Image (tube, rainbow, N blue to C red):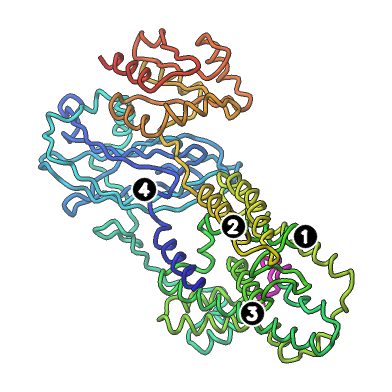
Amino acid sequence: MVLAGFLLMSVHMANAQFHAQELPMQQKWGLYSVDSQQYNLDCDLLAVLTISIEKGWHTYAHTPGELGKPSTLLIELNGASLPVYYPEGTRKKDTFNPDVTVNVYEDRARLYVPIPKGTGIPFTLLGNLELLLCSDSACLPAQIEIPFYSGPTPPQKLQKASSLSWWPEFLKITKAMPFGEKTPTSQLAPVTTTGEIKWDFSPVYAQPSLEVSGLITAIFLGLLAGLILNAMPCVLPVISLKLSSVLATCSFENECNRRKVFRTHNILFSLGIMTWFVALAVLLAVTGQAWGEIFQQSWMIMTLTAIVFALSLSLFGLYSLPVIDLKFDQGTGNPKVQAYFTGLLATLLATPCSGPFLGGVLGWALTQPPAVIMTVFLSIGLGMTTPYLLLIVFPDLVRFLPKPGPWVQMVEKIVAFFLAGTCIYLINILPDTLVLPTLILVWLTVPAAWLWGKAGPELPAAKRWTFRLAGLLLFAGALAWTTMPEKRDFHWVNFEAADVAKQLGQTPMLIDFTADWCPTCKVLERTVLTEENLAKWQEKYDITFVRVDLTENNPEGEKLLHALGSRSIPVAAFIGLGENARRPIVLRDIFTASQLENLLKSYKK
């Protein structure tokens, strides 16, 4: 039942992994009227897709420069492709290759789609956006379907594009790229009417002898790949779990008992390995995921990190855990169950690993029917269990293991040390924004596991289950809280002195000064400057929100703060248009949403 529940959760997770709302960005359409005669444009309507990118992330511009994947928007109206106009982006050194200069979109970018004259209202655009979102440590490829329905509002009642702050950018782009020029598409990768790119390759492999063309070859290479997988460097983080399988019998003096327990333990450990490969075959056959793709889910990595850390502290002697405890003295309630789940956990942690022969086997197998996928995965699992099968067939090998003694306690501590190192390996997989939540989860896992460990058999049943329930609730609450999707700061633009100076008087701005060490600033962010309020105010007042982060030394930000007559934060300043920009309205310390709303209303009037 536990495995079935885990499998169902994994299937649901895989189906949700490519949802646009999980990406560090948001997108929003707008439709505006255009005075085509005044501006010599061949359109009366202009559709604008605004992309808001989370702080710390960027995407490459449509013309990325020396490196990078271009951001591309494919638009169709009544079966015909429409041209799309892209901003140039900001030039900067590439995050992963500082020797290369690229063009990127940060904070916010607008993609412009002129609607041909004569298009009746309402109409529907079929859109497909393809881009590569990158932070300082990771990149996420995204392909999002973004249709747009214009609604029945007549053009004369739409907001005029020329009244908005981005209009000069649009005029500049259209001069650089005359209206009517089509967005180039490759004939080798034709685009369907739904915006889907159909790749048509005939790949040639460098080592054709290792490629799989049939089931027999797949089974043979799968056995070999599974065996080699035990020695791959990426499996080393779980070596401590495998070591526990071999040394679990060292606490037995009697040779007959040692052989019996040795064989039983390795049978169950191998069964745990095979169970995971069966579950993985079902998961990949149902969802169409790739090998190791399950580790794209942050909640999975965070949960495994907490479990492995709890096992580490158990071996250090802080408490004893149920099901899996890893102690060599067989002190757990059911060592057979422990052996099975240890094999299952060790294989799960090794899933991201790959090795020789595995690529060709998986490339062929995962395009086959479910029965073939299951057969091939069983062969990989059988190859991985080969060392343990040898120990099962030849249990007399146990005589080469050392006899019980004080050394067992020392080895337990060494295994615990390497398990803690496995946590570092797992945390390293996570995005930077999830490192702190994971550390909090690990921190709260300690008292949760300790409460469970306190529920020993010597306690009355009611008290024992009270401790266990408290530990479970603490762990479940910590997991739910730390894996909760964080609210994105989509509406904030990072402060750049040159950009603010350039827009001064041209664009209405609300500039907020904040810092991580300012608790009052954080209160305002959670109560006044919320994403909901910012979205509403941006829609109603077409205002740009600029955030000045003073967490670390920021000379340009401090100069602006001083120019506004302040030496402390929190501070927010509203800067209007034209000559009004010389008299910004400053809000000091604590202010409310209604105060800010009234200020914006008075400006709009």
Which residue bears the numbered disc 3? 384
Which residue bears the numbered disc 4? 72
Give the magenta part as a residue range. Answer: 226-241
The secondary structure type at the circle numbered 2 is helix
Residue type marked 3? Met
Mark 2 or mark 4: name the one nearer the start of the chain: 4
Q: Find the distance from the CA under tag 1 to the CA under tag 3.
A: 31 Å
In the image: residue 217, left or right of residue 458 = left
Which residue bears the numbered disc 2? 466
Instruction: Look at 48% across and 87% down and name the residue there.
Output: 214
351 is within the stretch colored magenta: no
| Residue 317, numbered label | 1
Instruction: Look at 45% across and 14% down and name the residue there.
Output: 587
Mark 1 or mark 3: name the one nearer the start of the chain: 1
Q: Find the distance from the CA under tag 2 to the CA under tag 3.
A: 41 Å
Mark 2 or mark 3: name the one nearer the start of the chain: 3
Q: Find the distance from the CA under tag 2 to the CA under tag 4.
A: 57 Å
Residue type marked 4? Thr
Residue type marked 1? Gly
* In the depicted structure, whether residue 34 falls above or below residue 68: above
User: Is label 4 in contact with label 3 (beta carbons under 8 Å)?
Assistant: no
Residue 471: x percent and y percent? 60, 55
Quadrant of res 555 = top right
Mark 4 or mark 1: name the one nearer the start of the chain: 4
The secondary structure type at the circle numbered 4 is strand
Q: For the C terminus, which image quadrant?
A: top left
Prevailing SS of the magenta stretch = helix
* In the depicted structure, whether residue 152 falls above or below residue 529: below
The secondary structure type at the circle numbered 3 is helix
Residue type marked 2? Thr
Instruction: Look at 35% across and 61% down and name the residue there.
Output: 189
In the image: residue 506, left or right of residue 331 = left
